Structure formats: C-alpha cells, structure tokens
Amino acid sequence: EKEAAELGKGSFKYAWVLDKLKAERERGITIDIALWKFETPKYYVTVIDAPGHRDFIKNMMT
C-alpha cells in the first residue's frame, strides 16, 4: 500500500499485490495474467487478475 502511494498509485493498492511487472505498476494497468491462491478453514480461493486493456487482451488469451 505504501509503495503504491509513493508512486502516486494509491488507488491501485489492491491490484499492486498481483501486478509485479514494473510497467504494470508504473502505468496502473494489468499487462499479464496473475494468479493468487490461498485457503481458509472453509474455502479454497483463487484470485485471477487478467488484463482488461485492449492492447493486452492477447496476453490473457495465450
């Protein structure tokens, strides 16, 4: 959260967890797909962050 705020991307603090590429963090958009899996005592959870920007849809499809 602090790192996102320092770069003026505070509103992207939740996306920051999955957006690891430098370009993703600088531009505030998802370029490549990312997965995050965890489990609770009751559920298995998979969070998928996929590109929504038209220039990067192909990254999600391949």
Image (cartoon, helix red, strand yellow):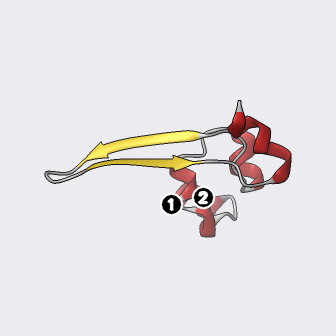
Residue at the extreme top of the image, as rendered: 62
Residue at the extreme left of the image, as rendered: 41
Q: CA distance from mark 1 to mark 2?
A: 5 Å
- Tell whether label 2 touches label 1 (CB within 8 Å): yes
Q: Residues within 10 Å of mark 1 (few under 14, many from 20)?
A: some
* Residue that carries the numbered disc 2 in the rendered image: 4
Above or below, 32 against 62 in this view is: below
Nearer-the-camera pick, 11 or 51: 51
Whole-percent x and y of residue 42?
16, 54
- As helix, strand or loop, the secondary structure at mark 2 comes to helix
Nearer-the-camera pick, 47 or 14: 47
Q: Residues within 10 Å of mark 2 (few under 14, many from 20)?
A: some
Type of amino acid under label 1: Glu
Type of amino acid under label 2: Ala
Quick check: 15 left or right of 62?
left
Whole-percent x and y of residue 56?
79, 44
* Residue that carries the numbered disc 1 in the rendered image: 1
In which image quadrant can residue 62 be found?
top right
Q: Which mark is residue 56?
A: none
